Amino acid sequence: MSGADHPTSPSVPAEQGAASAAFGVYVHWPFCLSKCPYCDFNSHVRHAAIDEVRFVRAFAAEIAATAARVPGRTVSTIFFGGGTPSLMQPATVGAILDAIAAHWQIASNAEVTLEANPTSVEATRFRGYRAAGINRVSLGVQALDDAALKELGRLHTAQEALDAVAIARAVFERFSFDLIYARPRQTPQAWAAELKRALAEAAEHLSLYQLTIEQDTPFATLHAAGKLAVPDEDTARALYDTTQAICAGAGLPAYEVSNHARPGAECRHNLVYWHAHEYAGIGPGAHGRLDIDGERHAIATEKRPEAWLMRMESLGHGVIVDDVLTQGEMADEFLLMGLRLAEGIDPARYTRLAGRPLDPHRIAILLAEGAVELTANGMLRVTPIGFPVLDAVVADLAA
Ligand SMILES: C[S@@+](CC[C@H](N)C(=O)[O-])C[C@H]1O[C@@H](n2cnc3c(N)ncnc32)[C@H](O)[C@@H]1O
Ligand code: SF4
């Protein structure tokens, strides 16, 4: 991987150009060793070996096709997500990074993250990933309780996950891990103890997700049959409040609904999404937002891995959706993403995107309810009262 930090002036819409210095590349690896019963990500289990050489060719072709549409960008962040990218050989990761560097500049301080499952086998590849150019890992620890891990269908124990965290700490300057809370029968007291244990192992960043029952998953079937109970609303709220208080007390406040970091250690790649900047989506089922000829394109690729491969090999691209967003759609997306952040949004940017300001009457109501506030530097942000009902706040402002 090569590249120097040469800021460019990409040919993007005037409004977005100012805020589009960040350019992210998301690479999706769509395979897992087994499917977790709660997960609805685009992840697939294959019993035959994956032909990584064939996939690398297809990833490189999609990077080339995307770069031809948005040339001259400087990549500030790269994120290998999944599925389970830590099933990839380090050489595969290196080849994909080389393909990115062959078509775009990569900033010298680029953040290059790989999502990893915390099994011992995967941890043995960490040094290889670092040599290939990865400088940050995000580990799916999920729980520090073996019974809970079993219920979540995970293939690792809590100890194995902690061992992987220790290896990540030794190998990478930056790492994060994910936990899922609001699990069946979880009490605020038990979660508080688990979270404190996690914080003792964390460095600078933690992602803490409330268990969501996703449609068409085994958990949804169990839930519908009354065989899997998630915490009721009051308990879920108490779990959320516990999370905020403990993390803030430990110096990792929430900078986004589910993400906590020491100030300055935020995941810069995810900030690209939440700041509504430009990013390329590479691989099966990846999404992108590209600014082409003054218009913002919402792009999605074929989700099924083998169908995506065949498209790549026959058509040279995997794109199945390429919609130009209207002003209203861009403004709504900006609200939806930006209000997830503790820092909030710049109402002036909303006005430029939408071609009209936010409705002052609706803002006044939300201010009176204490759900949002205006900061001294003019940002509009959701308050601790508003965050638990964020969807309603966004819907109110976007309407
Ligand atoms: C792409 S996934 C997983 C990455 C990696 N394959 C793993 O499992 O460790 C990213 C994260 O989303 C979270 N997640 C997935 N499904 C979820 C659900 N239904 N509810 C809450 N969090 C979920 C998990 O914490 C997971 O680590
Ligand atoms: S949670 Fe991770 S390992 Fe489990 S199915 Fe989803 S992507 Fe795969």
Image (tube, rainbow, N blue to C red):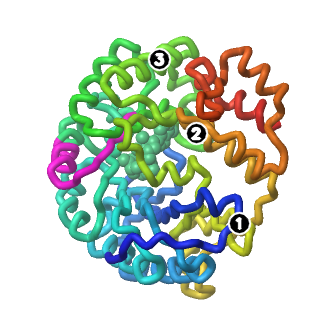
Instruction: Kindly report the distance in space between the C-alpha atoms of the residues bearing marks 1 and 3.
Output: 40 Å
Cα distance between the residues tagged 2 and 3: 23 Å
Q: Earlier in the sequence, mark 1 or mark 3?
A: 1
Q: Residues within 10 Å of mark 1 (few under 14, many from 20)?
A: some
* Pick the front one: 355 or 225: 355
User: Of callouts 1 and 2, which one flags the residue occurring earlier in the amino acid sequence?
Assistant: 1
Residue for badge 2: 214
Query: Which residue is located at x 19 percent, y 42 percent?
Result: 160
For the residue pair 187 and 204, the one nearer the viewer reads as 204
Q: Number of marks in the image?
A: 3
Dot 2 or dot 3, earlier in sequence: 2
Which quadrant is home to the C terminus? top right
Give the residue pinned by disc 1: 13
Relative to 1, residue 32 above or below: above
Residue 94 highlighted magenta (yes or no):
no
Q: Is residue 271 left or right of residue 148?
A: right
Q: Amino acid at mark 1?
A: Pro
Query: Based on the displayed image, in which of its 4 quarters is residue 386 positioned?
Result: top right
From the viewer's perspective, is 275 left or right of 258? right
Vertical order, 392 against 31 (above or below): above
- Secondary structure at numbered mark 1: loop
- The stretch in magenta equals 163-179
How far across and how far down the image is residue 99, in percent? 41, 80
SS at circle 2: loop
**Mark 1, mark 3: which one is toward the viewer?**
1
Whether the residue carrying mark 2 lies under 8 Å from ligand 1 is answered with yes
